[in-house]
Amino acid sequence: MDIKNDGARYAFVVRWSDPMTQIVWKYQFMYHTSDRSIEMYEMKNQKTFLKRVAYPALALEQLYIGSTILVYSRQLFIEDYGDDFTRKHLRGLQETTLAMIKPDAFQHTGQILECITANGLLIKNLRMCQLSVPQAEEFYKCHRGKPFFPCLTQLIASGPVVAMELVGENALCRWRMLLGPTSAEVARIKAPSSIRAQFGTDCTRNACHGSDSHESARLETCFFFIDRKLGMCARFRNCSVAIVKPHAVTAGSAGAIINRVMENFDVTAMELAQFTRATAMEFYEVYRGIVPDFLAMTFELGSGDFIAMEIADKQNPCMNPVNKFRDLCGPADPCIARSLRPHTIRAEFGINKVKNAIHCTDLEEDGELESQYIFMHEYALDGRAPPALVSKAPCTRKIESTDSSEYSSSGTCSGTTSGSSSCSSSQSDRGPPPPRFSCRA
Ligand code: ADP
Ligand code: MG
């Protein structure tokens, strides 16, 4: 029987942190597959919190331990299964494994992500890292002493890797099946459509890694995702920020969008993360009162996993890429994009002005600030204040207008400027640090 519609009721323990009071509430969360309905009970006071109601936006695949779901604007973190029935039925279906794109296949990250989602595996966590040789030796310590060890560890440290925690039924075996044999040359003969056959070169440069046991999956996941400073590679200069929005990640379009980005720009940092509603508002603060869709935009940005990237110019890494990258993304309104700039990312993947596939930095001076906001984890970890979004003030900012009058009849984007640069706030003028967005540990 199809597990997604088996008539079963699955139970989870979820927690919600009230952003106003900081109180953490725990709920028993029920999901009925027959009609995609949900219900919630507040656990401490044993009270009904939400009567059974159809909630078709939520799919069973999204309900796994460690996932954050959005229910009526609340971000609920799934902490555990709620009963033995759910544990027994879903544990096998929600196995996790560690996948890593090696430096030799980094340029194919988008295609590899497409392959992962096309094969029904979910990306629970993702981080791009630049490992040192000692870090690569630590990751591959089980191979220490083997003849290929020096070559392997040098390869891993030779460029960025993309570590991913994948979830799905038999995720570990399925990912290894998708990889194919260790040697790319053998893979091309025995499994020509496998990832290693397509993107690998030889026995060492074989495109991707996959855990070989549940225990190594657990250890390797901890290696990459406990210390989020490990191998941090963002540059924080001459950069723009791209965020593949939650609706596009959910639709499985992230890989195709990343392909488009990587064809045209260097990606110098990448991470899957989530904004809380509060941080989505902070990030978009400049649009408040200016863009009519402000609330809907913050809702979309805070509605689930996104993939953020730091972008640099391919030809000249010293050049500010913000405007060039905006050209690739296209007009904020995908309808306008489809008629005026049909080859842009928003024309291809956007749905409407709010679900327009990708966020891109607006102003040249904001690229570094947005990158710091997203990628500077040591601020969060060391308890230091994150950098304030200094120029993110309405008085200094050019707004991504969604009005078609912004475009001349020739299809060129003229942009709009909102007032003079009278705002002189500096980092020290700003109040306490904003709440940080969340990454899954
Ligand atoms: P897999 O990655 O398929 O699990 P292993 O765990 O045996 O393979 O090896 C780890 C990595 O070491 C391989 O992915 C490959 O990059 C490299 N490697 C393994 N065997 C060899 C070999 N005989 N010659 C060169 N490199 C090798
Ligand atoms: Mg192995």
Image (cartoon, rainbow, N blue to C red):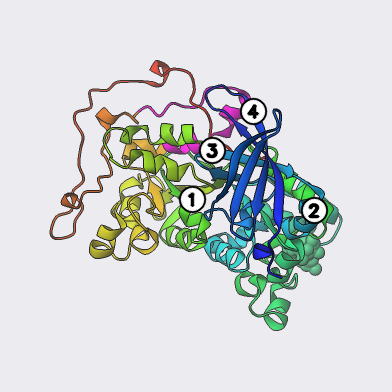
Local packing at callout 4 (Cα closer than 10 Å; few below 14, some 14-19, many 20+) is: few
The residues bearing labels 4 and 1 have C-alpha atoms spaced at a distance of 25 Å
Looking at the image, tell me whether mark 2 or mark 4 is earlier in sequence order. 4
Residue 6, image x, y percentages = 69, 64
The disc label shown at residue 246, or none: 1
Q: Within 10 angstroms of label 2, few (less than 14), some, or many (20 or more) residues?
A: few
Which numbered mark, 3 or 1, is in the foreground of this view?
3
Q: Amino acid at mark 1?
A: Pro
* Residue at left offset 51%, top offset 26%: 386
Residues packed near mark 1 inside 10 Å, few (<14), some (14 to 19) or many (20 plus):
many
> Mark 3 highlights which residue?
74
Mark toward the start of the polypeptide (2 vs 3): 3
Residues in magenta, as a range:
369-390
Residue 14 at x, y percent in the picture:
67, 39
- Image marks 2 and 1: residues in contact by CB distance under 8 Å: no
- Tell me which corner region of the image, top left, top right, bottom left or bottom right, holds residue 428: top left
Dot 4 or dot 3, earlier in sequence: 4
Q: Earlier in the sequence, mark 4 or mark 1?
A: 4
Q: Mark 2 — residue?
A: 85
Q: Which residue is mark 4?
A: 24
Point out residue 54 in the picture as x, y percentages from the top left corner.
54, 52
